[in-house]
Amino acid sequence: MGEPVRERRLHSILTAEKVTGIDARRLRKLLAEGGWVASAGEGKPNAWELVDAEALEPFLAGLRQKVSALDLQAALGMSRSHFELLRKDGYLAPDLDGSDHKPLWDLGAARKFITDLLIGAEPIYLPMHDWCDIPKAAQRLRISPGTIVSLILGRKLPRVGRYVGKDGYTSILVNLADVERHLQRPEAKGLTIELFAKTIGLKPAAASYLVKNGHVASTIGTNPKTKETQRYLSSGDIEAFNREFVPLRALAGLMGISWQQLRQDLLSVHAVPFTPDGRDLGALYEWAEIEKKLWCRWPRK
């Protein structure tokens, strides 16, 4: 008896509730916040508050992707403290934030944030001491996670890693030395002995002994905070160290085996750690010892 209506032309708050699955009371607050309808105390009843369906569809489609803070944290694989620290640094701001309803986040945009941080990331199967996720790296370097995020998004770090065994925020790995080099002031000449120790998995006392006794080359520079003269390890110093020595865990990564298995292999061939003057420096080996008894790092001709 009349013209068939093949497409919805109008939405009430009740019909929009059916489409989105969001409770009508909460949905009305969101629609009022977006300027689509009047608030509950000022407008018509939910069944009679009508909006053009075609114009409203993009907004409703966006609402389907909106999630709470808890759901966002779960989807991105981060703890509440990780989330709050990033928010404090200006990241992951809510898409809908009103005074009379809980904030909501666009899940698609949040996932893109993680994807952008992983652009060009190299797969890391066994993170060593010099690779850390963003929260741990920030804690060790005593900087904010947002500082590291800014360096990654600005493509200022030469390397970013992706921990193959994890997903989401904590799968993003950075190299401590790379971050530290970028943070150094012009007066500083490289890595501090303490940070160098952390990156190679030695105790600071052991690394300090290697430097002070000339087993590892170092460079004299000025501490940017205290203005005192101290020793650093430049990129050249570190390259020289890597030519002569290799820590147990780093060697395990190069060989593609677990460090526990490698320890057994080293014992079986009687390969001994580097112990100058009988001093125990931990699981640090000379390449000459490794190549003589266990494994050659260069292809044999």
Image (cartoon, helix red, strand yellow):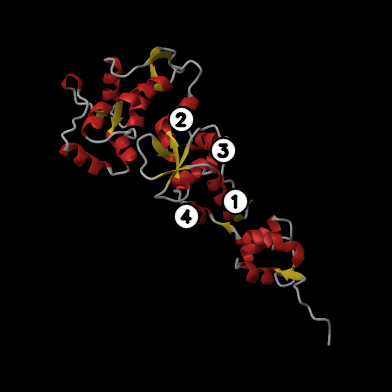
Which type of secondary structure does the marked residue at label 3 adopt?
helix
Which type of secondary structure does the marked residue at label 2 adopt?
helix
Which residue: 34% across, 17% down?
217
**Residue 41 visible (yes or no):** no
231 up-or-down from 59: above or below: above
Q: Which badge, 4 or 2, comes first in the chain's sequence? A: 4
**Disc 1: which residue:** 109
In the figure, is residue 28 to the left or right of 145?
right
- Asked whether the residues under the numbered discs 4 and 1 touch, taking CB atoms below 8 Å apart as contact, a structural biologist would say no
Could you classify mark 2 by the number of other residues whose Cα lies within 10 Å: few (under 14), some (14-19), or many (20 or more)? some
Q: Which badge, 2 or 3, comes first in the chain's sequence? A: 3
- Asked whether the residues under the numbered discs 2 and 1 touch, taking CB atoms below 8 Å apart as contact, a structural biologist would say no
22 up-or-down from 241: above or below: below
Give the mark toward the camera: 4 or 1.
1
Give the mark toward the camera: 1 or 3.
3
Which residue: 38% across, 24% down?
239
Amino acid type at circle 1 is Ala
Amino acid type at circle 3 is Leu
Label 2 vs label 1: CA separation?
Answer: 28 Å
**Disc 3: which residue:** 153
Which residue is nearer to you in this view: 255 or 78? 255
Q: Which badge, 4 or 1, comes first in the chain's sequence? A: 4
